[in-house]
Amino acid sequence: MIGPITRRTSLRLTLSAGAALGLAAAVSAPALAAEPTEITFYHYQTSNYDAFRAILDDFEAENPDIAVKDVFKQSQQITAEVQAALAAERPVDIATVIGKNIVFFLNNTGAVDMVAASGGDTAWLDGYLPNFLDLGREGEAVFAIPHAYGTPMVYWNKEIFERAGLDRDAAPKDWDEVLAFAKTINETTGMPGAAHLHASMGDYGTMVMTTNAGAEYLSRDGTRAGFDSPQGVAALQYWQDLARSGAMPIASDREWTAAFAAGQMGIYITSSAALRPFVAASEGKFELGVGNYPLFKDQPRRVNNSGAALMLYAPEGPRREASMKLLRYISQKEIANRWSRESGYMPLVQDPLSDPAMAEYVEGFPQVRPVIDQMSQTVPTAVWPARGTLEAQTVIRAMLDELWAAERPASEIVPEAVAEVNAALAANQATQ
């Protein structure tokens, strides 16, 4: 028989109920206030940062349990900065890695195989163009996926062409025309005629010019340079001739970019990533022409991609799971194409125009058509090996400086440089 509920009993029950509610609240509070899993993404986006961050923000909106912290480093410093962060065991979950340095990172850092991290579901990787995915492939493993790849294009100022007596609507088709047009522009207008990007160590510009001429810049395993072939020497002689003629001022890529954007240079050969900035800079100043990379005599067009890939470093557990979600997200055709449209980098997925938004974009922005047309003629960047890379690239930088000084011909300078490069890379052959 249940006795009557006295005041003391009532109080005891009230306290017990309150304690139970308090305990329940205490148990549920952490679940309600759970912090999202934070992943750290190293990148070098500057002018494209807003587009880059907007994609990350949209991903976060779809995945509120994940927060993406982006860490900016200059493109010239990002290799060293990522290495330093990894060595110091600071958080690095996804890192932007310059394409030519993928093998170095693969051999010297704890990069994660994305095939293994996919848990058997690798269909998301199949959407990428195979020639770009191969840069990060080792056997059955994939350690890097394409992200910010460009292809070198010809940009020209149509007003300057007209002032120089050239056809304002005709890009230089080959290197003979580049040199001839540049001289004509310089002689008739007093402005710089043409320039070709070289990149910080001169490596990428040298690679593109010699590869397009039919030379082998580096062997497939990256352990030997071969651009001292007749084709390679002839290509680099054009670069020297541009400088010696006075049509190409000796300057940095940054200075050339600024001059062209200001309407003070006739022709600039640089990455497709410059397309949108040049379109914006030319508005109201001059009409911009965009064309495909100049051919070298009778050789088919073969140009190396520039830019960077993404590598995975997140440790096993929630950070890796969150990082893989993000990588899958940005690999989707619609997202990859959106990044291409907003950044100016090449589309990296197969059949990009099957995306209605991309097809509409190209129709309304015809300057991008040469970029898409050149995708099939773009070959993977040559990848440097694990040892001797910095020494080799330093030699190439010095080679370009001597070429542009024009005190000796390319036929003397280039073979000497290649011999020094191969001496620097010899340590890789000894370990094979």
Image: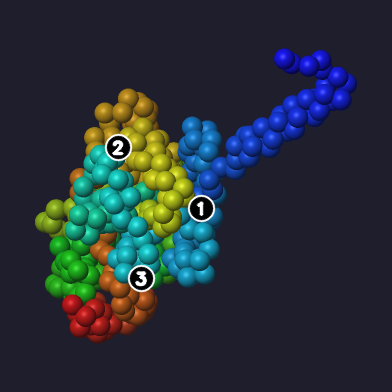
The answer for how far apart the CA atoms under marks 2 and 1 are is 35 Å
**Residue tagged by mark 2?**
369
Q: Amino acid at mark 1?
A: Thr
Relative horizontal placement of residue 109, taking residue 414 as reference (left or right): right
Q: Work out whether 9 lies above or below 215.
A: above
- Quarter location, residue 194: bottom left
Whether tag 3 and tag 1 are in contact, CB under 8 A, the answer is no
Instruction: Give how far apart the Cα atoms at labels 3 and 1 are.
Output: 20 Å
Query: Eyeballing the image, is 138 above or below 237?
Result: above
Q: Secondary structure at mark 1?
A: strand
**Relative image position of residue 261 (x, y in whole percent):** 48, 50
Residue placed under numbered mark 1 in the picture: 40
**For the residue labelled by badge 2, is the local secondary structure a helix, a strand or a loop?**
helix
Can residue 413 be seen at all in this image of the molecule? no
Q: Position of residue 124 (x, y in %)?
A: 29, 40
Q: Residues within 10 Å of mark 1 (few under 14, many from 20)?
A: many
* Mark 2 or 3, nearer chain start: 3
Mark 2 or 1: the one toward you: 1
Residue 420 in view:
yes
Q: CA distance from mark 2 to mark 3?
A: 39 Å
- The quarter of the picture where residue 96 lies is bottom left
